[in-house]
Image: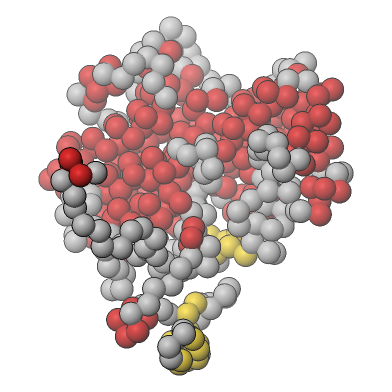
Amino acid sequence: MHPTTLTLTDPENQQTITLPVRKGTIGPAAVDVSGLYREFGMFTYDPGFLATASCSSSITYIDGEAGILRYRGYSIEELATKASFLEVAYLLIYGELPTEYDLSKFEHNICHHGMIDEALKNFFRGFHHNAHPMAVLIGVTGSLSAFYHDTLDIHTPEQRELSAYRVIAKLPTIAAAAYKHSKGEPFIYPRYNMRYVENFLHMMFATPCEQYRVNRLAEKAMNLLFILHADHEQNASTSTVRLTASSGANPYACVAAGIASLWGPAHGGANEEVLNMLEEIKDVKHINVYLDKAKNKNDSFRLMGFGHRVYKHYDPRAKILRGVCHRVLKELADSNNPLFELALRLEEIALQDAYFLERKLYPNVDFYSGIIYRALGIPVSMFTAMFAIARSSGWMAHWLEMMNDPEQRIGRPRQLYLGHALRQYNSIGKR
């Protein structure tokens, strides 16, 4: 660590404070302010934690200015074209790419933990038929701790690993069951002889009435989407998982909290908002009207699926998805669907509009993922559930990492208090 000197000035005196700087492998260094309050009685103020590193991690690296995303040092472009989702999940959890033997064993373990307890069927029946799938995911995932209470020792490495397997394996089963419940159809059990993504699509769309075969392009597209959504550094849901875990909460409670955070329209629900926006625009001939509304700062309309909180360049995940999106629409979707025609035309116009180009408001991963999910037959209400399945691997990787972090403490953000100073209580008759 190399010291840096910060000079703080107030009306009464001048203080010089020396704080250490922590440097990572790459990326911005971080000023360690952990001793600031203890030594000088001051907090740092950073709404939204835009410039605050809440932890150290070796899992994912993002450079928003350059449009870079890497898992454990591997570029997302290379992983997206060469790896399977479970291969990426293994990489995130264990830090290295698996050998053939390691991957085979990992796939076997995940596959054979896909079943959920039969008693959970009664839990699903407690939800209204039109309950949002994310509400079901939160409830059922949180309840898993009641079924595995004998393996919740977070201080035992073997039990931690088992919990990671269960979360990654069971979320697709829970999500598919939530969809079947909304349709009034019987649940489809997971199959041990199917690949992870193939198995999920089978549970989603198969029925006991006839044989169902998963389309290979659909499986490939979903595998890609899962890889691209597997992790994204200290985003809101991952930070929520970490913050919940810092209290010693069991892993299923931590993941349920992460799912709740993911549900927000500014996070995992953004791709759902993209489709809602397209439904609002309705027709290609209305695009220019809505683009003008998006440029008007006094208009509440926002162009969903464009721009990103972190990326000030083209979202690298969106670049990868763009080509797949066009292929899926060409081969699997109804070519006469006006919604898809609208989406592609909106993309084309926005990418040529100086207003959006100057502000670097490029189509992001949510824009393309929503369109692909729709083309694959995934209902809009299930979009965020897809995100949760993919992100389960990243959540568990971060949970496992922090369990081994000697610097890990219970999360306790502080605040800048702006309320009343001391006030006196008056009896009700004198108010």
Q: Residue at x 81, y 51 (%)?
A: 357
Any part of residue 342 in sight: yes
View extreme (left): residue: 150
Depth check: 359 or 103 in front? 359
In the image: residue 396, left or right of residue 266: left
- x then y, percent, for residue 143: 23, 35
- x then y, percent, for residue 13: 43, 91
Picture quadrant of residue 260: top left
In the image: residue 23, left or right of residue 252: right
Q: How is the image coloured?
A: secondary structure
Q: Residue at x 81, y 40 (%)?
A: 350
Please count the marks in the image: 0
View extreme (front): residue: 430
Any part of residue 321 in sight: no
Depth check: 213 or 276 in front? 276
Q: Residue at x 15, y 46 (%)?
A: 427
- x then y, percent, for residue 302: 67, 38
**Looking at the figure, which quarter contains the C terminus?**
top left
Picture quadrant of residue 61: bottom right
Q: Please, is residue 42 above or below residue 265 in the view?
A: below
View extreme (top): residue: 209
**Looking at the figure, which quarter contains the N terminus?**
bottom left
In the image: residue 36, left or right of residue 149: right
- x then y, percent, for residue 374: 61, 25
Q: Residue at x 47, y 39 (%)?
A: 264
